[in-house]
Amino acid sequence: MKTPASLQTLIEDGVIDEVLRPLKSGKEAAVYVVRAGDEVRCAKVYKDMAQRSFKQRVQYQEGRKVRGSREARAIGKASKYGKKQQETAWKNTEVDTLYQLRDAGVRVPAPYGYFHGVLVMELVTDAEGYSAPRLGEVELTATRAREFHAVLVQQVVRMLCCGLIHGDLSEYNVLVGPDGPVVIDFPQVVSAAGNNAARTMLLRDVNNLTASLGRWAPELLDTWYGEEMWALFEAGDLQPDTRLTGRFTPDLRSVDLDAVREAINDARELALIRQQGREAVDED
């Protein structure tokens, strides 16, 4: 394969030694398997704004902090410099998030650095050393589905305690390693306190996981972990080790229970559509 220019720069700088193969290509970035010394890692090459198809970006960026006041003003004015800074901030988001979440004990790939717009990080593998499959690609027993659900809900809690919400969590950005699920893909991460849609995105993330794993353990579909953790978060009572019950008594005056369940079904259908789109891209 032809080595992408961005990765060739990393080879010349001694960050990596060799590009082994492409791993996946999505709407936001292309990921490659690389070798750095004796270790096999992965390198995430972010696509430029003109090449990306991710829509609703403004909604996700609401509440994000910018590193300097000049940059913040430029972004607000949508100047040429501001757009450049917005692009830089978007690319830095996942890097900063990975370091923060890794330090907080969240199950995410270990980051090894950000060089010339390329994120180098741990390659999550299965028990045989091959690239780990996505959660949506594995068959599970009911017991294993419940175990995975408990682990993933705990990761969402720990993220929320960091003030962050994944924003696009589903069975297609969770990898299954030998020690269980690992959460990936954070460029669209949401500020829990600074984004008006934070609660909606959190519930969608949890509902996506519940819908996926509920195929193997249907009793999960009768749980309310997202609502429970958000209520604790709003009250200031959520801790990284909080043990949730999955039970929640909604305010029936303002909550449409049928709509919540419909949202779970919609999340399942959306995940299927996304997977079909990814498969179509891979075939091209």
Image (tube, rainbow, N blue to C red):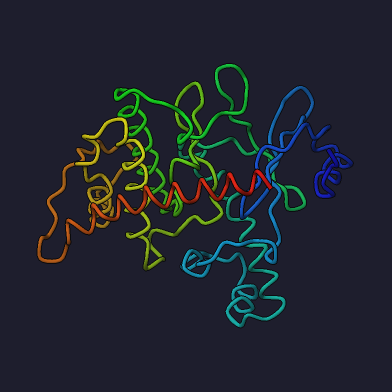
Q: How many marks?
A: 0
Question: In the rendering, at what x and y percent does residue 128 appear?
Answer: 59, 16
Position of 220 with respect to 34 (left or right) is: left
Q: Residue furthest top?
A: 128
Q: Is residue 135 above or below residue 65?
A: above
Which residue is nearer to you in this view: 13 or 149?
149
Question: In the rendering, at what x and y percent does residue 186 appear?
Answer: 53, 50
Position of 212 with respect to 223 (left or right) is: right
Position of 9 with respect to 133 (left or right) is: right
Position of 76 with respect to 271 (left or right) is: right
- Locate the N terminus and report the quarter of the image it occupies: top right
Q: Is residue 142 above or below residue 106?
A: above
Image point (17%, 56%), residue name: 257
Question: In the rendering, at what x and y percent does residue 182 appear?
Answer: 49, 34
Image point (55%, 46%), residue name: 185
Question: In the rendering, at what x and y percent does residue 283 appear?
Answer: 66, 44
Image point (85%, 39%), residue name: 11
Give residue 187's quadrant in the image. bottom right
Which residue is nearer to you in this view: 135 or 149?
135
Q: Residue furthest right?
A: 12
